[in-house]
Image (cartoon, rainbow, N blue to C red):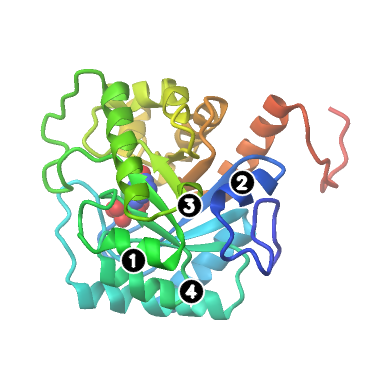
Amino acid sequence: MSAKPGGRTEDSAHRPVSELLADSGTEFLVMGVVNVTPDSFSDGGQYLDAELAVAHGLKLQDEGAAILDVGGESTRPGALPVPLDEELRRIVPVLEALAAAGVDALLSVDTSKAHVAQRALQAGATFVNDVTALRGDPEMASVVAAAGVDCCLMHMLGDPRTMQHDPRYKDVVDDVKAFLEERLNFAVSQGIALERIVLDPGIGFGKTVAHNLELLRRVDELVALGRPILVGSSRKSFIGKLTRRPVDERAAGTIATNVLAYAGGARIFRVHDVAPVYDALTVAAATVRRRWTARASPASSTT
Ligand code: HH2
């Protein structure tokens, strides 16, 4: 298992993700998506078997993922909630096996249920990715605070059943920013350390194509909140609407959104196609930061 720049070292499991970012040398982290679900919008059913999910996670790590985000409940528009036991049955064995395999990547659990988060933390996760930003379960904030782990607070308008029904904002960036600021203050008031918090505009969660593009174009305004911004645009339907590509042919569109968001100051990128996004961000980061590490290339070339 090779650790790429941005991956965690042996004792880094409990270091804040913001520290890992600062030490990454590239100032970006790629979060690889491991969906253990039958119905996720882009890869539903592909990794429902725990062994396949683990193999997929290991592959994503080798491709450059510094965080592996393991989820057992789809949040696609119209998705129905998954019972607690079923969500546990899907994700706990996968997290345990990844931890037992000694992965360098941080393990993240994509859940809005406090009990699932708690079990995931016992199984080796150190990052709670809660798309409800601590609103879905009243116990979630105290689970994250007590464990002293990282969490991601994401903006969503409504819930997955209703969020794409005519979403409206006064100004989408101002509204999302105000929401994230309020959630950030709430999380800190509940005892979650500021340096453990990552914020996410929730691309595709109650947003039109125009809303998503506006958020990507003005991501610097969210960066001004002072916390690392995570962007989860990977393969989402606005990319399909712009390119007319089916869900498994949206890597190029995904790269465009991530590189632009990186240039605007976003730092964590949740993606399905880790290898091409990692390469694109490596080149983007070298360009923006004027610093890079040259690696031996398979075929030497001077161009
Ligand atoms: N998007 C999805 C799920 N979790 N978490 C964060 N923080 N940000 C996101 O944008 C985000 C997320 C949806 O993508 P996916 O997991 O591929 O699909 P599904 O929810 O259908 O499983």
In the picture, the disc for residue 196 is 3
In the rendered structure, the answer to whether residue 297 lies left or right of residue 281 reads right
When the figure is inspected, residue 120 is found, relative to residue 294, above or below; the finding is below
Question: CA–CA distance between discs 2 and 1?
Answer: 24 Å
Relative to 255, does residue 127 appear above or below in the rendering?
below
Q: What whole-number distance in Å separates the C-alpha atoms at marks 1 and 4? A: 14 Å
Decide which of tag 3 and tag 2 comes sooner along the chain.
2
Please provide percent x and percent y for residue 95. Answer: 45, 74
Q: Nearer the viewer, mark 2 or mark 1?
A: 1
Q: Is residue 155 above or below residue 97?
A: above
Residue sitting nearer the eye, 40 or 204: 204
Sequence-wise first label, 2 or 1? 2
Residue 88: x percent and y percent? 29, 76
Q: Residues within 10 Å of mark 4 (few under 14, many from 20)?
A: many
Residue that label 4 marks: 124
Q: Is mark 1 within 8 Å of ligand 1?
A: no
Q: Which residue is mark 2?
A: 21
Q: Earlier in the sequence, mark 3 or mark 4?
A: 4
* Type of the residue with mark 3: Arg
Label 2 sits on what residue type?
A: Leu
